[in-house]
Image (spheres, rainbow, N blue to C red):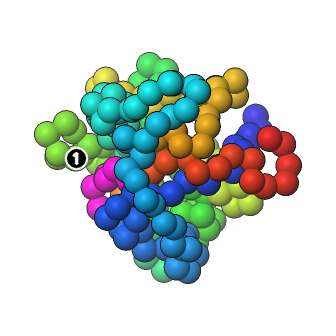
């Protein structure tokens, strides 16, 4: 199967979260963005017709936190770290979507350790197996065998539509830490050449 490249969407971080990002995968400083209001209280326009309360995002954020894993990949110079969501599960097999660049140094051949996070904040490690990675699209798929019930993060369908001002959040294990939530909002859609 081929990877489908998502439509680029611009987001802006809010308040203190804006200062938590240290840079892009190439370790260059990311351009700073200016947020004037908290997106969780911003009017979402015609699509929802009203305010979005933080409580509306509590359940999706909790599920996303439980479906986020941390990865460590052995390579010739040490280890590379990343994170990603569990996006599918079939029996004891679970699929993780992550960034392809974390496999650059190992060329996809290093041992993979996956940390699963429990609701109480503890974690446990299990081995992972790389299915494939694509450096040009910066995507990778990793599988794990898991006997316990793991929540899955649903991937947006191509038919789902988003608008500027919609609140969004991302999760990640910044610098190998436990998963954290970064609140943002969509500021623009289809700002690049190519399909809308």
Q: Position of residue 195 (x, y in %)?
A: 84, 42
Q: Position of residue 59 (x, y in %)?
A: 31, 28
For image coordinates 45% across by 60% down, the residue present is 35
**118 left or right of 96 in image:** left
Q: Position of residue 23 (x, y in %)?
A: 49, 73
Q: Most extreme residue toward the right, as rendered?
A: 194
Looking at the figure, which quarter contains the N terminus?
top right
**109 left or right of 71 in image:** right
In front of the other: 154 or 160: 160
State the image quarter where residue 97 is shown: top right
- 182 to 92, vertically: above or below: below
Q: Most extreme residue toward the top, as rendered?
A: 91
On the question of residue 100 being in view, the answer is yes
In front of the other: 170 or 19: 19
Q: Position of residue 188 (x, y in %)?
A: 65, 50
Q: Most extreme residue toward the left, as rendered?
A: 120
For image coordinates 50% across by 24% down, the residue present is 49
Looking at the figure, which quarter contains the C terminus?
top right
Tell me which segment is drawn in magenta. 175-183
In front of the other: 130 or 158: 158
State the image quarter where residue 149 is shown: top left
- 47 to 1, vertically: above or below: above
Mark 1 = which residue?
A: 123
Give the total of numbered labels.
1
- Neighbourhood count class around disc 1 (C-alpha, 10 Å): few under 14, some 14–19, many 20 upward: some
On the question of residue 82 being in view, the answer is no
């Amino acid at each position: 199967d081929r990877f489908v490249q998502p439509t680029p969407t611009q987001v802006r971080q809010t308040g203190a979260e804006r200062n938590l990002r240290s840079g892009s995968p190439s370790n260059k400083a990311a351009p700073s963005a200016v947020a004037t209001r908290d997106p969780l209280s911003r009017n979402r326009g015609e699509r929802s017709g009203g305010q979005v309360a933080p409580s509306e995002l509590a359940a999706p954020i909790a599920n996303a936190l439980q479906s986020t894993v941390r990865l460590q990949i052995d390579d010739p110079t040490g280890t590379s770290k990343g994170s990603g969501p569990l996006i599918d599960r079939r029996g004891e097999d679970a699929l993780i979507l992550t960034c392809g660049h974390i496999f650059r140094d190992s060329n996809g051949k290093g041992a993979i350790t996956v940390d699963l996070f429990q609701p109480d904040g503890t974690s446990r490690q299990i081995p992972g197996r790389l299915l494939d990675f694509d450096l040009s699209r910066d995507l990778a798929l990793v599988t794990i065998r898991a006997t316990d019930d793991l929540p899955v993060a649903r991937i947006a369908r191509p038919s789902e539509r988003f608008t500027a001002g919609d609140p969004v959040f991302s999760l990640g294990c910044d610098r190998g830490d436990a998963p954290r939530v970064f609140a943002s909002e969509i500021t623009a859609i289809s700002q690049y050449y190519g399909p809308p």
